[in-house]
Amino acid sequence: MSLLLPDIDPRRISLAQKIFDQQFEQDPRLEQEMDDRRKRLMFQDILYNFDFLSTAVQIEDEKLFTNYAVWLYELLCNLMKDIDRDRIKDQMVHHYEILKTFSDKLFEEETMVASAKTILDVAIDATEDAMDNYQVSEAFLEGPHLPIRRAYLNALLRSETQKAIQIIEDARKDGLSLEELYEDVIRLSMQEVGELWYQNKITVDKEHYATSTTQMILARFYPYIFNQKPVDKKILTCCIGSELHEMGGRMVADLFEYRGWESVYLGAAVPIPSLVSAVAEHQPDLVALSVTMPQHLQTCYLAVKTLKEKYPSLLVAVGGRAFKTSGGIYKTWPIDVYTDLATELVIWADKVVAKT
């Protein structure tokens, strides 16, 4: 990278070039993530890092550099919205690690070299912590088991699969019921993942990772869920039309199975004719339709209307994030119940189906 920087010590420019080149050599993904403009800004940031680190070492104030590091991290997250926070964190931590190896080229005295390495270690910790300090919604903060929920969400956003698994398993061992794990931890965490994606704070690959990891964790409960005493009741669940977000429907089916119901889960993007055919085949006591994206609400309405016209006595429930974006649209639909919580739906269904 050739830049004309007449006011900066040429030795620092040369050192910055070596650090720049080494980071690109060790991290090939940077070539795809950084266009020419970003490369120029990244090189300039290395020189700024030299200035802040040198000042922090000279005045013996590590907080000066750590505050700068956190500020820089948040700035880059805001400027590079196509790259998720976890990846930007990795880039910065990698840079500080490389900078540590060049500290003896930036400073002459051994005590200053040692101080620089210590300051950089603290900056790495601060950057790691800053990755978790994104603003979450008020809905995520409400309700019980927030520390577990927060830890689980952090593990997902850091792509720490084993840690996410361990958090859920530890919570189960500590006495949380399956319903509490599903509703208070997993449901709210996945809703927050969706919100972060919607706000462009995480990329779609991170959202997909969180979903697939959570599905894998849910599957670990299946030997327990599917070993309950049957109650001779059946629910059919699915996501209608072209709706691809199937997590909510899957969790509804799981909790009904846990209560002894037989569940028929059709998955995502089920066409209305296929839904009608499935109802004829399986003869469920209850059909539960899940909608996450608002653009699928009209299709859901048509599905409800079709089911009620063909099977007037069939119980039909709807739920999902999409309904929260409307002004209570479900109130005009020919449904039997709307609820945002699978546990509430189970309780309602146990009472109503028992009376029919």
Image (cartoon, rainbow, N blue to C red):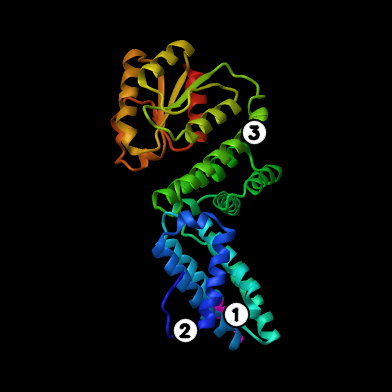
Characterize the local packing of mark 1: few (<14), some (14-19) or many (20 or more) Cα atoms within 10 angstroms.
many
Precedes in sequence: disc 1 or disc 3:
1
Residue receiving disc 1: 62
> Residue visible at 46% across and 21% down?
286
Q: Secondary structure at mark 3?
A: loop
**Gap in Å between the C-alphas at discs 2 and 1?**
24 Å
Residue type at the position of mark 3? Phe
Q: Say which residue label 3 marks.
A: 221
Vertical position of residue 223 compared to residue 98: above or below: above
Q: Measuring 56% from the left and 74% from the top, which residue is drawn there? A: 66
Residue 105 appears in which quarter of the rendering? bottom right
In percent of width and height, residue 309 lies at: 31, 15
Query: Is residue 287 in view?
Result: yes
Q: Earlier in the sequence, mark 2 or mark 1?
A: 2
Mark 2, residue position: 8
Tell me which residue sits at (39%, 48%) in the image: 198
Question: Residue 93: x, y in percent?
Answer: 58, 65
Measured in 3D between alpha carbons, the distance from the residue under mark 1 to the one under mark 3, in whole angstroms, is: 47 Å
Disc 2 or disc 1, which is closer to the eye?
A: 2
Residues under labels 2 and 3: Cα distance? 60 Å
Relative horizontal placement of residue 146, taking residue 324 as reference (left or right): right
The amino acid pointed to by label 2 is Ile
Q: Which residues are magenta?
A: 60-65
Question: Which label lies toward us, 2 or 3?
Answer: 2
